[in-house]
Structures are given as C-alpha cells and as structure tokens.
Image (cartoon, rainbow, N blue to C red):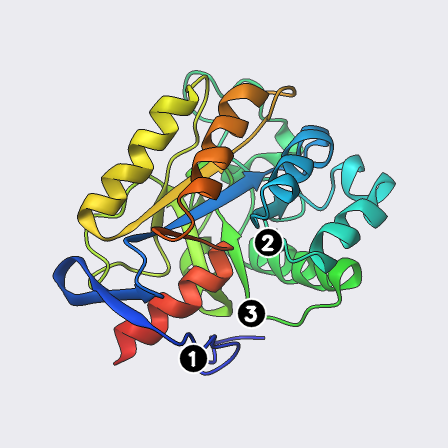
Amino acid sequence: MRGYPLLLSFVLWPCIALAGDGFSWPQGRKAAVSLAYDDALASHLDNAIPALDRHGLKGSFYLQLSRDTVWTRREDWRAAARDGHELGNHTLFHQCSGRGPGREWVAPAQDLDAATVAQMVAQVELADTLLAQIDGRAAPRSFTVPCGDRQAKDGDYVAAIAGRFIGVKVPGDAVVVDMATLNPAAVPVLAPEGMTGAQLIARVEEAGRKGTMVNFTFHGIGGDYLQISNEAHDALLAWLDAHRDEYWVATFGEIMTWVRQRQAE
C-alpha cells in the first residue's frame, strides 16, 4: 500500500491540551512517550512484554522477519499484537552498511552497500505482507531503519519506501525538539544501552518540559545485546505508570497518527 491515508486509524480523544509552541497532546498530557524494541529478540518476549503488561503500557516491536525468533515464537508475537502492542517493519534481513570500523559483523549477503533500491523496496514490501500474516493488520505500519543506514548501492532506499509508512524512525536524540516541524519520515530515536532507570526517566521529563515526545528504541532487555537491565527498564515503566496522567504512553503508530493529524490542521 503506497501513500499514507491521513484519515486512516485516527483516534478521537475527548480532551485536548496545548503543548510546546501550541502543539496539542491527548487528554492534557505534557508529552508523548514511545517505547520501541528492535530486532525481534527473545528478551522482548521473555522480559519486555511481561513488564509492559504488568504496568498496562503498550510498546512497538520492530521485527526482523528472517530471525528465527519471529517464526518459532509466532504465537507469542500474535498474542502481543492481540493485546495492543504494535508490530512494525524492520525489513527481512536487517541490511546495514558494511563500511567503516565496527561493521565487521555485517555479512556480505546482508550488506546494504551491495543491495539496490529496488531490492530493498521489494524486501520491505514483503516484510509488510509477512507481518500481516502474524497480526492480521492492514497497512499502514511504521518502520525503523536498520542501523540508520539509508544508502543502497544506487540511492536512498528509505526515500523510496517512506510513503507507505505512518512514521519512519532514524537515529538521533531521544527528545524531539519541535513537533510542528517534525518530519514523520525521519523521527529521531535513541537506542539506550547501559542506561539506568533514572537516566531514562530524565529524558522523559525533558520531553515534558518541551511539550514534545521522547522516543526510545531498545534492543536487549536483561539479555541479548545492546542491553539495558531489567531493573532499569522496570524503573522507567513503573514511573510512567505512576505518571500516566501527565505523559501519553502509546505505540509509535498511534503517536504518529496523532502527530500527522495535528500537523495537517
């Protein structure tokens, strides 16, 4: 499905308050909080989702569709989606550039430098189809750019696929500077590693002062790689649970639906 239909999936909220520079959030909240998790890791199913469910919060999970965990635990992902968590597109093979120091782990078959834009577009479209087989949802979805790398062999593949997504996440700071000028096809996110609960909460409070949104994209939760501890993760969730009247914690797709609606007014 190409092109984002602006009126699709709008959520109507009974009370709207103005946040920084006149941007409004639902029900008088100070800011929005996106809790996202990349790569379809076992620790998401074993640690992150149970913690989110304990606190009544919803997360966004970006599945690398070639990962064994997607298919050996398909029913767990399906149950998460049924319970209100978002399943997002993170491509089939997690193509990243193999150039530069620290990229020795990129296998030749998954090297974005060797892929064409057309190949990446086909891969992303097929990933959407496979995601629909898991959660039964139609497009539009949201997308996280693997490694933040955009340049295929013959051009910027993200520019070619951005129109099919409600929002596209790219590496950057956790806190959005200005909601009115935010580009939905380039929403900055932070991938926390080794951060404490207090440090994560401080970023949420920063977004509250600015009236914008904070975007976390986690990897391992108490395991796997690029991880934060279960304790830090739960401290953040417990704080958000206790401050749910001040901060709107929603899936990235729900938040970007709201943002697009406000920007179109």
Disc assigned to residue 88? 2
Horizontal side of residue 67 vs 196, given as left or right: right
> Tag 1: residue type?
Leu
Quadrant of image for the C terminus: bottom left
Give how far across and how far down residue 237 sits, in percent.
Answer: 50, 36
Disc assigned to residue 86? none
Disc assigned to residue 6? 1
Q: Residue at x 60, y 71 (%)?
A: 139
> Tag 3: residue type?
Pro
- Can residue 228 be spotted in the picture? no
CA distance separating discs 1 and 3: 10 Å
Give how far across and how far down residue 141 sits, in percent.
Answer: 56, 63
Secondary-structure class at tag 3: loop
Q: Between 71 and 43, which is closer to the camera in this rendering?
A: 43
**Residue 194, picture quadrant:** top left
Relative to residue 101, is residue 97 depicted above or below?
A: below
